[in-house]
Image (cartoon, coloured by chain):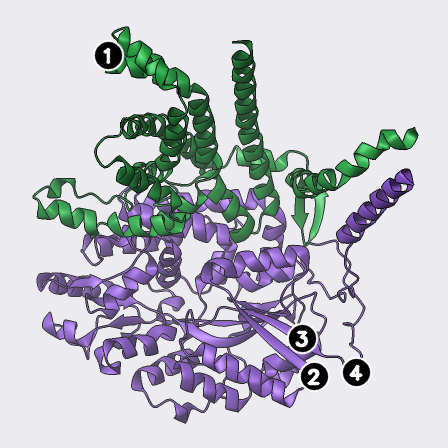
Chain colours: A purple, B green
Amino acid sequence: MKMTLRIASALILLSLIIAGCATPATQAPAATQAPAAVTEQPAATQPPAQPTTGEQKKLVVWWWGEQEAPGAQKWMDETIAQYQQAHPDIKIEAVLQSTDTLVPAFQSAAAAKQGPDIQYFWGGVWTLENAWNNALIPLDDLIPADERAHYINNFERAYDGKQWGIGWYLSGNPMVFNPALFTKAGLDPKNPPKTWEELKAACTKLNAVGVTPISGGLKDGWFGGWLFSILARQTHDSEKEFMQASVGNTPFTDPKFAAWWGALKELQDAGCWNKDINSLDYQQGQDMFVQGKSAMIFGNDTFLKGWADTMGGWDKMDVMMVPKYGQGKMADQYITTAQGWGITSWSKYPKEAADFLMFMHTTDRLKAWFDYTGVLPADNRLDANAIANPILKQIFTWDTTVAGANLENFIPSMLDEQSNFAGSQLLFSGDKTPAELAQMAEDVAAKWRTQSPDQVQNFQNWLK
Amino acid sequence: MRFRRIEPWLYLAPALITILLVFGYPIVRLTILSLQRTSGGVARFAGLTNYQFLFKDDVFLQAIRNNLTLLICVPIMVVVALVLAVFLFERIRGWKFYRTTLFLPYLLPIAVVGLIFSYIFQLSGVLNDFLNHIGMGWLALDWLGSTKYALPTLMFVIIWKEVGFGIVLFLARLMSVEEELFDAAKIDGANWWQLQWYITVPQLSTVIEFFTVVSVITMLSWVFNYVYVMTGGGPGNSTMVTELYVYLQGFRYNQMNTASAVSMLLLLVTGIFIFLELRLRGQSGSAEAFE
């Protein structure tokens, strides 16, 4: 009897362990179509799994919250509520991600093929890397072409003739300045600097009255990437030139590519920047402008409404195109990227996810987005008459007439981090010269090519 | 009879399976990943390619150098913790207050400590303001923004935070040392230094060994939070450490295989130190038993 009890208890224990370790019975994710990247995985042919009628469908959205657009949370809550009301069988859960977890969390989800149905993405390589890893599906069959035609900056997410995501709102980089501080320094706020020489002269005048000319923060690195995107473009005609250099067709030591380091150094030598730029992070550098401690900032137009609220009104600032030092076509462009969405390859409800994305682009939702955030949506159906503010009107004009790509979206992330982020810090700390930094960029690009031959191939395909 | 032989294994099974799942599986998976290259979501065997890449990557080599530099913190921490523990053991005036105060930094979350010290050490931060105020402006340096000072500044913060653990360890051991040992030495005419050198330090040797090994492991593979919050590895990779390198490779550059290779190396190095610690403990255990 004692022996039987022992055997029974041991067996029960064992079966409990086995049961506990077993994979829960779930529906296998639908196979999806892979991009024609460097992959041997066969392109899937099966359509997405269709749930049975009457089933409660749950869509999980991972997004970036109000990081760039205060008011976005209210809009998202309202949009979800309206969509759920119109589609009682669908429940949408929006999960917030911070800047630091946005990419890692999705990488982990992609590795496990479990996670959100809809993911927020920055444009270009930030989206396409996930398409190359089979974490995204193309949206061409889910969102009609005539609908997609309204979306601005769709080219950032196009690869292999397919659309791997869609835009949501526009994020551009004007140079923002404080008219009162300009006046204090004897500068004309109606006629801000247009050339590099004028900018340096303005720095001298601002310094003379004890005002920091331009503020920034490089400690967390991101602003180094911005500087690259804002300045390096001026000697180039197209973002493709940077893709060419990345894959090794042109060296980054070429004077055209090295020029921006020199231009940045000139600004440093002219005393244009806050001296503590290396010990502040981006947000702190930005705060200096908002607090009226600096006269100019390489800003982001998604922040403008928030700054206006904090600074006490839109009249406390104005915008200008970044002064020119180069003669490339991109020097005359306004940098814009569309922050957007993608649908994951493991989503059980891709059709419903696409429908929700289209709902975000209905005219009512576009207007609500602009009203709540003061940020321009990536859709040309926004009624231009709704933009009463002259600064935002100016941004909208640039967006629709002289918009150009954000270069950070068209280079490998390793190059951005190890060359632009680190290089800007080294320039300001006085450890490296512009020529050495150009060589550093070339070395990092060469290292990336060695480490990631498949990514190089993907970039080459992307260039076609 | 046969059941009797397997019976213990059945009872051990839950623990064994848990250990295998929690430790064994990730290590095996990590090893496999480190020997693969992934292309278009498909992983292929790549031998030691990832490891070869690492030793050609200047950023990785810089990270290794920085981790090794951080080891300088270990003897400093041991000595500081030892001295403070001795003072507390001697019950200097207000010792209870000091005991709590000195241990407090160890209880604070690293992110909070990092954030506070980031503000203190900014070029226009509290420390430099104070130095300027007292006429020592020449000492107001760009503590976190200069490639020369960022790592030493980071080391200072790590020591400030981690030393409390050593103090508590040493103090706890000192309190269990028999008073007679000190009394006998005093009767024999030992002065303060001789008491510490011939009684305190030998009595603390096992705890010092333990604290040293734990601190070495901390410096090699447990400083990510400090670096991430205070410098992000900059300026210009001057504070890059292997853990941050793993994070960047895996989650920023999408190179999970390279990240796995670095993790394997980290595991190997920390494994060696854990083994050393166990050996030392085993030896001192046998010595004590022999005595």
Q: Which residue is rendered at x = 80% and y = 79% of the image?
A: A52
Q: Position of residue B151 (x, y in %)?
A: 33, 38
Q: Chain of mark 2?
A: A
Q: Label 1 sits on what residue type?
A: Asn
Q: Does residue B9 lie above or below B208 as drawn?
A: below
In this figure, which residue is indicated by the disc labeled 3? A58
Farthest residue toward the top?
Answer: B188
| Residue A367 seen anywhere in this rendered image of the structure | yes
From the viewer's perspective, tell me whether residue A38 is left or right of residue B193.
Answer: right
Q: Residues within 10 Å of mark 4 (few under 14, many from 20)?
A: few
Subunit bearing disc 1: B
Three-letter residue code for mark 2: Asp
- Badge 2 crowding class, 10 Å Cα cut-off, few under 14, some 14 to 19, many 20 or more, is few
Marks 2/3: CA–CA distance: 9 Å
* Secondary structure found at label 2: loop
Q: Which residue sits at x=62%, y=53%?
A: A457
Q: State the residue position of label 1.
A: B191
Q: CA distance from mark 1 to mark 4?
A: 88 Å
For the residues beneath circles 2 and 3, the answer to whether they share a chain is: yes
Name the kind of residue labelled 4 in the image.
Thr
